[in-house]
Amino acid sequence: IQETLDYVAQRSATRGCRSQAQVSGIAFDMVCSGPMGAHATNIAIGDHCRANDDPDADIDFGRCARLVPSSLYRVAVNDYIAAGGSGFEVLRRNTSKQDTGISLRAALLGEARTG
């Protein structure tokens, strides 16, 4: 997760430090310049980690858990990103990924019908 979000920060650094990655269930701050280069920090796992889901608000670690680098997390991405598309090589290299066989179209239609 750290390496994936670091990549998001690196790409975003060239775009005015605004992420184009759409995420849910996780919050993080991007550092787009400095001695360590572009990277993600203050990574929190959970929903509504920022007041009113405001991307400029501080992360509330009372509501969300800090990322534990040694822990195992499940992440859902589409097959294009999972295969390393758009430069997400870290996801392509993931040896524990599982293909659910559910197409993005089917998942969206299922959610639209139940949501």
Image (cartoon, rainbow, N blue to C red):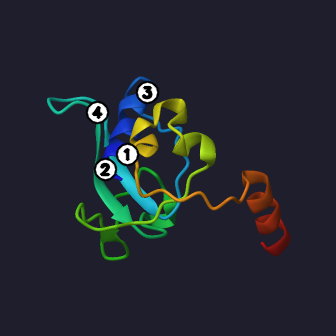
- Left/right placement of residue 59 relative to residue 18 reads left
Q: Label 1, label 4: how many angstroms apart (C-alpha)?
A: 10 Å
The answer to whether marks 2 and 1 mark residues whose Cβ atoms lie closer than 8 Å is yes
- Tell me the CA gap for discs 3 and 2: 21 Å
Instruction: Tell which circle, 4 or 2, labels the residue nearer the N-terminal end.
Output: 2
Report the residue marked by disc 1: 5
Badge 3 local density, few (<14 within 10 Å), some, or many (20+)?
few
Q: Is mark 3 on a helix, strand or loop?
A: loop
Q: Residue 16, which numbered label? A: 3
Which of discs 4 and 2 lies nearer the camera? The answer is 2
Q: How crowded is mark 4: few (under 14 residues within 10 Å), some or many (20 or more)?
A: many
Q: In terms of depth relative to the viewer, which is nearer, 36 or 73? A: 73
| Residue 81 seen | yes
Of mark 3 and mark 1, the one earlier in the sequence is 1
How far apart, in angstroms, are the residues tagged by discs 4 and 2?
A: 12 Å
Q: Which one is in front in this view, the residue at disc 3 or the one at disc 1? A: 1
Q: Residue at 80%, 67% (x, y): give it.
A: 110
Q: Where is residue 101 in the image (x, y as percent from the top left)?
A: 68, 58
**Mark 1 in CB contact with mark 4 (< 8 angstroms):** no
Q: Which mark is residue 38?
A: 4
Q: Looking at numbered disc 4 in the image, what kind of residue is underneath it? A: Ala
- Amino acid tagged 2: Gln
Quadrant of image for the C terminus: bottom right
Give yes or no for contact between labels 3 and 2 (Cβ–Cβ under 8 Å).
Answer: no
Measure the C-alpha gap from mark 3 to mark 1: 16 Å
Q: Given the current orientation, which residue lies at the most extreme left position?
A: 35
- Judged left or right of residue 76, residue 113 is right
| Pointer 2 residue | 2
Tell me the amino acid under the disc marked 3: Gly
Nearer-N-terminus badge (1/4): 1
